Image (tube, rainbow, N blue to C red):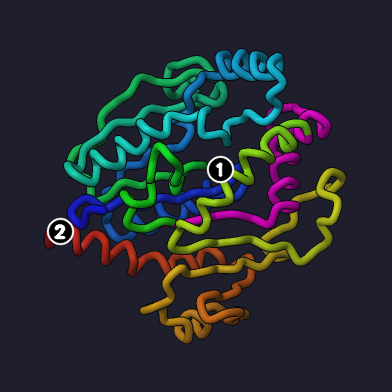
Amino acid sequence: MSKKHPIISVTGSSGAGTSTVKHTFDQIFRREGVKAVSIEGDAFHKFNRKDMKAELDRRYAEGDFTFSHFSYEANELKELERVFREYGETGTGRTRHYVHDNDEAELYGVAPGEFTDWAPFEEDSDLLFYEGLHGAVVNDEVNLPQHADLKIGVVPVINLEWIQKIHRDKEKRGYTTEAVTDVILRRMHAYVHCIIPQFTETDINFQRVPVVDTSNPLVARWIPTADESLVVIRFKNPRGIDFSYLVSMIHGSWMSRANSIVVPGNKLDLAMQLILTPMIERLVSESKRA
């Protein structure tokens, strides 16, 4: 970690709502006048779309049915750690974009399923913001949490995650329920071994829990709304967290453990603003003093 060049890492599984969290961070950055450079986990995939399909076919032929974008070996995690380290030491680094669809293709001038060229970060930034699948990975080759100053986990309970993925992939990508189910099954090994362990490394976890029946996510007709959900917020180190203030400010919230607070799903943005704004202010002020 570097006081002079702080790093915020947001790690979430697919469909967990990390893009919504990024929007909240963007609001805080804009309001507080923080200049952040952002990197996306997709930028550090090892394969473009065509090569990923070829790699999947190769592994299928060899009897490996567990390979996915969740897997360590499908991502350039050493490069991601190098970027974290370089930014922490010098405030510089580089990133690129993975182009998902035609809209992004028009924006970046690269075909869908391809990467843009690597490009350097803007100069004189206040902090680095990462959002993706692997921001808190610790394995035999990399240790990403050691480089980040604030680590956030965003994860729904698993049936809700599956419902969100099924609906997104069917509506936006034209997949069938059966095809999405196959992807979920293929990802389960890496989900257990690569994704879940990261949430013990994070400083704060936001876990969305539906309060309606999600017992069969494969036939759910709609995604539970924010009003039909609660969010459990867990602090790895609760020291210095003013829980009484948070409970008084967030209507309908309560403490469930000494390090956890539960808030209504529609109060997530407010909770994040109240919790994260002073943390970001502190990181930036300490970096400027350093």
Mark 2: secondary structure? helix
The residue lying furthest to the front in this view is: 140
Vertical comparison of 259 with 45: above or below: below
Foreground disc of the pair 1, 2:
1
The image quarter in which residue 206 lies = bottom right
Which amino acid type is marked by label 1? Cys
The quadrant holding residue 167 is top right
Let me know if residue 21 is in the magenta part. Answer: no
Percent position (x, y) of residue 261? Answer: 56, 75
Q: Give whichever of 230, 110 is nearer the camera.
A: 230
Mark 1 Cα shell of 10 Å, populated few (<14), some (14-19), many (≥20): many
Residue denoted by label 1: 194
**Which is nearer the eye, 101 or 220?**
220
**Amino acid at circle 2:** Lys
Which residue is under mark 2? 288
Q: Does the residue at mark 1 contact the one at mark 2 (Cβ under 8 Å)?
A: no
Mark toward the start of the polypeptide (1 vs 2): 1
The region drawn magenta spans 152-181
| Residue beneath the point at 48% across and 79% down | 246
Residue depicted at x 27% and y 50%: 127
The answer, for residue 171, to whether it is visible in the render is: no
Q: x and y percent of residue 52 in the render?
A: 58, 19
